[in-house]
Image (cartoon, grey):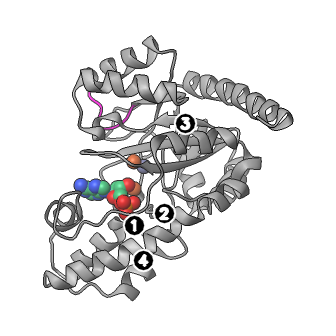
């Protein structure tokens, strides 16, 4: 059993990269990918800790692409050598989070919720700051009774304190990952909030841009969604992947590897991912040598 989608304290998870690797071993996972939002700051630590704990660590990242009305996230899986260059390429995206968070705090202030910035930064620690951190401090100060409520009333897309930030287009996300010898997988397709036929067309466009796979197994994907996403992926020769999107205490309903309890991501998905990555690395080396 494996898990290809999880977050550490470097983004909005509550476990450090080392503690996360330890938890993966305890959950009997044979392979795990760290996919923090927009950052690979914890990736090397995670890979070393996985090695020590006796499981295969995979370098990953979760990028937010321009999309509406729902949310499009792309998971990238990259070779270890890509960690530093990709991290450098994501600097502008990381900086835009800071600007956006300031705007959100100002908007909240205008709505009567004073959320001290230093408290938000303190719980984010070394990691990139995200809305879940803001939601946690809103809850601490009693403005909302749960983080869910914070998203529903204030922070979610379309809500009064929602502010957008600089994002790459899906095409740019996919190219960036390919340039670094990685593969690009559409995360949790249900968050796109589109019909099945619209999703099919969207996938065709993404495949034309080079998309490699679809996250078919995911806690919120019940049987019907798994069947639909699996069929759409197979028809286009795409990889099928899966993961829990574990965030630790920031989303306590989700268990590592197991999601709400019945998620099982088979080892065969790791093998298929690894072989697709090998192909992608070979292509990116050829492109570099020929100056394409
Ligand atoms: P950000 O990275 O700042 O845009 O925040 C996005 C993150 O917020 C997601 O990755 C989730 O971890 C979390 N999130 C998004 N929507 C919700 C929601 N409705 N309830 C709880 N957490 C959410
Ligand atoms: Fe998150
Ligand atoms: Fe996501
Ligand atoms: Zn995620």
Q: Which residues are magenta?
A: 217-222
Quadrant assignment for ligand 2: bottom left
Rounded to the nearest whole Å, what is the CA distance between mark 3 and mark 4? 30 Å
Judging by the rendered image, the residue that carries numbered circle 4 is 123
Judging by the rendered image, the residue that carries numbered circle 1 is 130
Label 3 vs label 2, nearer the camera: 3
Which is nearer the N-term, disc 2 or disc 1? 2
Asked whether the beta carbons under mark 1 and mark 3 sit within 8 Å of each other, the answer is no
Is 232 placed left or right of 16 in the picture? Answer: left
Which is nearer the N-term, disc 3 or disc 4? 4
Q: Which mark is residue 184?
A: 3
| Residue 103 placement (x, y as % from top left) | 32, 77
Judging by the rendered image, the residue that carries numbered circle 2 is 11
On screen, 283 above or below 11? above
Mark 1 sits near ligand 1, with its Cβ under 8 Å away: yes
Q: Quadrant of the C terminus?
A: top right
Kindly give the residue lying farthest to the top in the view shown.
Answer: 235
Q: Residues within 10 Å of mark 3 (few under 14, many from 20)?
A: many
């Amino acid at each position: 059993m494996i898990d290809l989608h999880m977050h550490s304290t470097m983004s909005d998870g509550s476990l450090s990269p080392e503690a996360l690797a330890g938890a993966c071993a305890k959950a009997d996972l044979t392979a795990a990918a760290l996919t923090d939002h927009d950052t690979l700051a914890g990736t090397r630590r995670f890979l070393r800790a996985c090695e020590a704990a006796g499981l295969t660590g995979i370098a990953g990242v979760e990028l937010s692409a321009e999309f509406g009305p729902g949310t499009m996230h792309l998971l990238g899986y990259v070779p270890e050598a890509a960690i530093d260059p990709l991290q450098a390429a994501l600097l502008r995206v990381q900086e835009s989070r800071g600007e956006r968070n300031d705007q959100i705090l100002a908007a909240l202030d205008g709505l009567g919720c004073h959320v001290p910035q230093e408290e938000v930064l303190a719980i984010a620690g070394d990691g990139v700051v995200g809305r879940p951190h803001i939601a946690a401090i809103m809850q601490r100060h009693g403005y909302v009774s749960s983080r869910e409520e914070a998203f529903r009333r204030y922070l979610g897309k379309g809500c009064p304190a929602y502010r957008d930030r600089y994002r790459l287009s899906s095409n740019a996300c996919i190219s960036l990952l390919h340039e670094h010898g990685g593969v690009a997988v559409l995360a949790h397709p249900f968050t796109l909030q589109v019909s099945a036929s619209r999703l099919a067309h969207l996938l065709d466009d993404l495949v034309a841009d080079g998309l490699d796979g679809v996250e078919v197994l995911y806690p919120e994907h019940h049987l019907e969604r798994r069947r639909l996403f699996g069929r759409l992926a197979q028809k286009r020769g795409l990889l099928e992947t899966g993961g829990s999107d574990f965030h630790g205490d920031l989303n306590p309903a989700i268990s590592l590897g197991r999601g709400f309890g019945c998620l099982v991501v088979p080892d065969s998905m790791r093998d298929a991912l690894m072989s697709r990555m090998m192909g992608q690395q070979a292509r990116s080396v050829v492109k570099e040598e020929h100056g394409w």
